Amino acid sequence: MLADALSINDLANGHVLKRVLPMICDKILDSSFCIEEYREMVGLAAVSHRWHELLQPYFYRTVIAQRIEVKNKSKPWAKSLLKRKKRKAGPRFRWQSNVENVIAAGKSHRTREIRIVQRTSGTMVTLEDVLRGLGFDAGDWSGVTTIRFIGAFTQYEPFSDKDTQSACGYFLKTFPNVTELDCTQAHCAKDPADSFLASLTRWYIPQLHTIYIDSFLPSSPLDHYPEHVTRVLIKRSLYPYNMNVHQFLASALKYLYIDHIQDHFNWERFLGADEESTEFTNLEELVLKFSYWDQPPIISSPLIRKMRFPSLKRLTISRSFYAISELYPHFIASPLQSLCIREEMDKLRPFDTAIIRSVTELDVTVVKNTARVPDGWGTVFADLLGTVSTVKKARLTGTPFIFPEHIHWLYLEQLTIIPETIAWSSVVKVISELPLLLYLEVRCIDMEDSVPDLFSLTQSRLVRLDTRLQMVSLGMNGVWSTADRHNLKVLAMCVPSLIKLCVSARYVNEFETFASQFGQSFSVAPIT
């Protein structure tokens, strides 16, 4: 273990470790991580002094206060007695936090997020008392910009309006520079719009840069217009009690997320400079997630046609054909760099693929939600691949998968294809027509036909594909046929630039033996 850690530490003079550990931590410490995941990170830091040094900033970036059930470690003979007592007295709980460690290290001023987690039922107590009891009063939390609530908070409702005012005042005094209050992972049994979290939102709203339109947004009119807001997340499924959503200046927004959209969505809540158009001058990322709708989709909307997105770089659209049949053309003029599309097969219709011309990243998923494949459906992927585009990284998921006569993504470097089935001839076509392709991943149930126009392994000469391809990853369900294993070996020998081949774990030894036998320099690894 120590030797492995040291070898990782020394790779590329430590630069590999510097990049890998933050990636691992970002994966562990996602938007819903709790004290358990925090301990995993602490465990990583214990591997070596170098790892501890690199991970140290993550120790104080987020401070967690979490209520957990105390596990009883009594001996077996006492369990029945304890169960009877537990039924009478109820389970035991206590709050855990890393706040003491952060304060002891003198790093509280570097904390950026406070995360309050409550996943268990309990007795009535205010969150002000909880935080005071954990020792938050001893820290300098001037750097905290986000407070995130996770779990059920009914038990922590203040006892009176006076308690509410006191608790909100305590939060505002202790965490004075908060610009984001996230309650999207919280819930309570009573009307959320009248809860303590709704009151806290009202207190913070004048200074918020990120605002969540959800069940905890106060139902009554706000005292202050949220003039500093640049990020808006509208969780339409989370505000059944609060339909009076406030308006925002379109020109101020940099990020906009809307889910559960239907054709009657009120786009007028975004204010433009004039009546002729609504220009989202500074909007860089837009996420639009549509919901099931039992009415025929509209072609477009006058309000949507008025919208302009001159700075939009990242766009995600999901299930748009449930509500609007011609949404994609509205974004063709935007300077998109990243486009993510999620549609369903029975609703998807051909659309203007000119939207992908300037993108560098493309992710398209079409969900097969019907047993019968609609006529002409497969042309969607053919139209995309046949469109001249600057895309460099692409992921295509769907079936059936039809390729055009020529692929016009000449700048593509990374490609992941996830169909049900794909022909070996199509794989060869992809490699042959994409001159800059470096990474190819194919994940499917099975492959079709054999490798065309390539010599068999028994001949001394092989057709060498003109490609820069360095890594191929092939994943198929179950047992691979003899023909599929043979075809992949032929393909590997026809790619002189190949450095790494990833296959199912059960075939690693076979392909390693093959590479050695035929003098191939590429390495073989299991699919991750």
Image: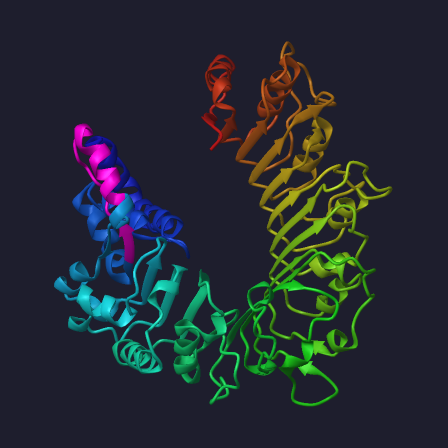
Residue 37 vs 440, above or below: the answer is: below
Residue 455 vs 19, above or below: the answer is: above
Name which quarter of the figure residue 169 lies in.
Answer: bottom left
Residue, far left? 104
Q: Give left or right: position of 194 versus 422.
A: left
Residue 305 visible to an observer of this rendering: yes
Indicate the position of residue 34 as horizontal and vertical percent values.
Answer: 33, 53
Indicate the position of residue 73 as horizontal and vertical percent values.
Answer: 19, 37
- Magenta-colored span: 66-86
Quarter that holds the N terminus = top left
Name which quarter of the figure residue 330 lies in.
Answer: bottom right
Q: Between residue 483 and residue 405, name the one nearer to us.
A: 483
Residue, far right? 375
Taking the magenta stretch, the answer to whether it contains residue 488 is: no
Indicate the position of residue 138 as horizontal and vertical percent values.
Answer: 15, 71
Indicate the position of residue 26 as horizontal and vertical percent values.
Answer: 38, 52
Residue 285 visible to an observer of this rendering: no
Give the residue displayed 60% in from the left and 73% down from the top. Answer: 311
Taking the magenta stretch, the answer to whether it contains residue 85 is: yes
Residue 294 vs 482, above or below: the answer is: below
Q: Between residue 434 and residue 278, name the one nearer to us.
A: 278
Q: Give left or right: position of 3 versus 165.
A: left
Q: How many marks?
A: 0
Q: Give left or right: position of 41 versus 406.
A: left
User: What colouring does the structure picture have?
Assistant: rainbow
Give the residue displayed 73% in from the left and 89% down from the top. Answer: 275
